[in-house]
Image (cartoon, rainbow, N blue to C red):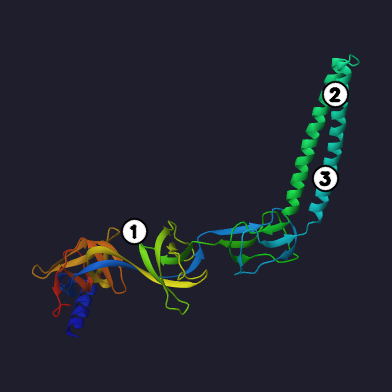
Amino acid sequence: MRDRVGMIAAAGLWALGGAAAAEEPLAVRVVPAQPVTAELRLELTGEVEAAEAVPLGFRSGGQILEIAVEVGETVAVGQLLGRVGPAQARAALAAAEAQRRAAEATLTQARQARERTEGLTARGAMTQAALDAALEAELSAQSTDDQARAAQAKAAQALRDTELRAPVAGVVTARSAEAGQVVGAAQPVITLARAGRRIAVFQVPDAPQISAFAGREIALRSLDGAERQVRAVVSEISPVVSAQTGTVRIKAALAEGPEAPGLGAAVAGRLDLPLGAAVSVPWSALAVEGGRAAVWVVDPGAGRARLTPVEVLRYTDERVELSGGLAAGTLVAAEGAHLLYPGRPVTAVEGVR
């Protein structure tokens, strides 16, 4: 109580602006900088996802007749996932087949004509020019037949593309279309999580040292009620901070095995990163000098305080950890520092803490 009265009295004298008051020692509460072993701890809570998600859509657009799978269903390679109306594709295939048959007939006629012309030319009944024309007509018919066969193959593929089949084994994680809906070519309608590797995805607060967590192992526990643990290794740290949440995304590759949580399972864990020796001071001791962090260092013998720049390592709930600029045990002003200025006489309050 006596200390607080002293501080109020000192502040009042300064407000009056008297020359004598300017030299009156200011009572400040000082605390020693505490040595600490600093570490960065991240409490992680996230979700298990597939390491690779495959968005799938029909190669040919149209009206969906059927979506044959549900979200969460496990599918095998080649399994039917959905169909769009095949009427146009069937008509196109029929037309391509007719064109191919016509081209094949024309080629047969051209080949027979060339063979007859060769025989007559050998007997001297036809000129070489006639034989050359017959050969040219056969080559043209052959080219037309090749084009017709390619068009038929393309039309046949388009008919097959009215069915969407699983290119890989996996689990259906999303379904964005229903029967009766008209979709465009390659518009995603189903997302398939490839079977195999799984990852855990977390959103964590940004920190300067967060990149040092890359490659570190985490012991994750499942939050589904079962007491299961699985090892994971940090595989990716996003270099971009989310504009919406101010967090950074971390991915960890889960060890494969029967104990691994399923897709969508909630998991939690913790990452600790030792940051080395540091000192800590209360939040109230922190000041600013030239845009940099600083503290008022108090020398009780000299009765003065000096503003000393410091390097902030990290902020905790109640204290600030410093990595440079201040030695352990140094007395700093923790209360009343906002009234200090260079050269101001000070008195350290009894009962230093």
Where is residue 248 shown, x and y percent of the image?
43, 62
Q: Residue 48: horizontal and vertical position, in percent? A: 49, 68
Residue under label 3:
97
Tell me which residue sits at (73%, 65%) in the image. 66
Asked if residue 282 lies left or right of residue 169, the reply is: left
Residue at which label 1 appears: 212
**Residue 43 seen:** no
Amino acid type, callout 1: Ala
Give the crowd class for mark 3: few <14, some 14-19, many >=20 residues within 10 Å. Answer: some
Alpha-carbon distance for marks 2 and 1?
Answer: 78 Å
Q: Quadrant of residue 279?
A: bottom left
Circle 1: is it few (<14), some (14-19), or many (20+) Cα within 10 Å?
Answer: few
Identify the mark nearer the N-term, 3 or 1: 3
Q: Residue at x 68, y 58 (%)?
A: 164
Asked whether disc 2 touches disc 1, contact meaning CB atoms under 8 Å apart, the reply is no
Is residue 272 at least partly visible in the picture? yes
277 on left or right of 225: left
What is the three-letter code of the residue carrying label 3?
Answer: Glu
Q: Is residue 146 left or right of residue 290?
A: right
Residue at the farthest right position: 125
Task: Identify residue for label 2.
Answer: 134
Is residue 161 depicted above or below 151 in this figure? below
Q: Is residue 77 left or right of residue 108?
A: left
Toward the bottom, the furthest residue is: 1
Quadrant, the N terminus: bottom left
